[in-house]
Image (tube, grey):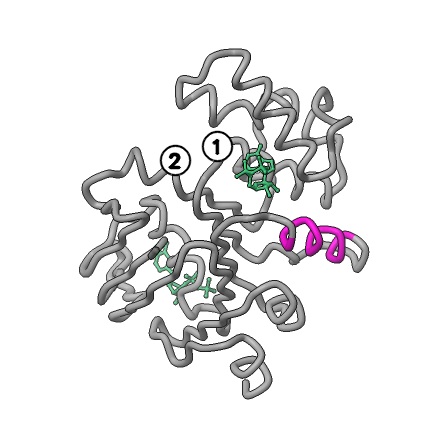
């Protein structure tokens, strides 16, 4: 089944800057795709369009058969976006409250929320840190907490913007192991080619807002 389908997607920022030009891309369920490309290529814009944080200016985005234009609420549930800077995602007094925020908002009961928080913290390896304020965590722990906040929503598609940026070699390796163990459709932007090669079977290169290459990560990255 198809998880994500972009058809002739374009996006122009309100100031008139056109960031994406006719992007067509289909991502299968369970597939892991790295989105590569220089600064300004349109990678972050693409991430924001995937869950409707930005509204398409032309073309369409659909996720699991739902249209971002028509079914925005449902799409937000199915596509979790992990921002590059975890501080943009952690704003509650404790880590557990941040991780609980999404499922509480979806209307799940207290018991289900507690269960999801526990599982998500456990999955990212910070089970003991739920009671801590996010600003007491190391950068790597914050990254994990931000991922837990997305996992607790149990999205079908997880989008990560530059997951390895800012991490030391150990944090980078540990996060890689975590991501490799997630049994979900993954779309990640990165400048970290070895990471892309290790974690993704497919790579898409964006340049100037257009797809300039799309294929097996091993080939694309070795050729790049
Ligand atoms: P990347 O993530 O690949 O570095 P972005 O998606 O951030 O690229 O940016 C794509 C293009 O859109 C760039 O030329 C950038 O300058 C422009 N851009 C990004 N955000 C805005 C904005 N809020 N308003 C106008 N132009 C923007
Ligand atoms: P299982 O019950 O076998 O873990 P799921 O379909 O529920 O199967 O989870 C799929 C994947 O999601 C698991 O491989 C796991 O790594 C990851 N995961 C872990 N914790 C959570 C969570 N709280 N919410 C969603 N997914 C999670």
Closest to the observer, 27 or 71: 27
Name the one closer to the observer, 43 or 125.
125
Horizontal side of 224 relative to 127 (left or right) equals: left
Q: Position of residue 218 (x, y in %)?
A: 58, 79
Residue bearing the label numbered 2: 77
Is 186 left, or right, of 67 in this rendering? right
Question: At 38% from the left edge and 61% from the top edge, which residue is drawn?
Answer: 27
Nearer to us in this view, 169 or 180: 180
Which numbered circle lies on residue 120? none
Q: Is mark 1 within 8 Å of ligand 2?
A: yes
The C terminus - image quarter: bottom right
Return the disc, 1 or 2, that comes first in the chain's sequence. 2
Q: Quadrant of ligand 1?
A: bottom left
**Which structural element holds mark 2?**
helix
Q: Vertically, is 73 above or below 57?
A: above
Q: Residue at x 73, y 54 (%)?
A: 167
Does the magenta segment cover residue 174? yes
Q: Quadrant of the N terminus?
A: bottom left
Residue 46: percent from left, percent from top: 38, 58
- x then y, percent, for residue 190: 56, 64
Question: Vertically, is 207 above or below 92?
Answer: below
Where does the magenta region start and end?
171-180
Residue 76 quadrant: top left
**Residue 121 located left or right of residue 157:** right
């Amino acid at each position: 089944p198809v998880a994500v389908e972009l058809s002739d997607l374009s996006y122009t920022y309100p100031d008139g800057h056109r960031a994406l030009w006719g992007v067509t891309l289909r991502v299968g369920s369970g597939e892991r795709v790295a989105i590569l490309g220089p600064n300004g290529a349109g990678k972050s814009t693409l991430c924001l369009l995937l869950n409707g944080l930005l509204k398409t200016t032309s073309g369409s985005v659909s996720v699991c058969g739902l249209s971002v234009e028509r079914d925005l609420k449902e799409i937000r549930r199915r596509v979790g976006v992990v921002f590059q800077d975890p501080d943009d995602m952690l704003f509650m007094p404790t880590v557990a409250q941040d991780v609980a925020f999404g499922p509480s908002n979806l209307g799940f009961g207290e018991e289900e929320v507690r269960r999801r928080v526990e599982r998500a913290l456990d999955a990212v390896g910070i089970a003991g840190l739920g009671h801590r304020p996010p600003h007491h965590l190391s950068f790597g722990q914050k990254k994990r907490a931000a991922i837990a906040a997305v996992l607790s929503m149990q999205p079908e598609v997880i989008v990560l913007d530059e997951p390895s940026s800012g991490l030391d070699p150990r944090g980078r390796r540990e996060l890689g192991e975590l991501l490799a163990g997630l049994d979900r459709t993954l779309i990640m932007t990165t400048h970290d080619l070895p990471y892309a090669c290790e974690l993704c079977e497919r790579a898409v290169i964006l340049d100037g807002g257009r797809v300039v290459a799309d294929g097996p990560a091993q080939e694309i990255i070795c050729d790049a």
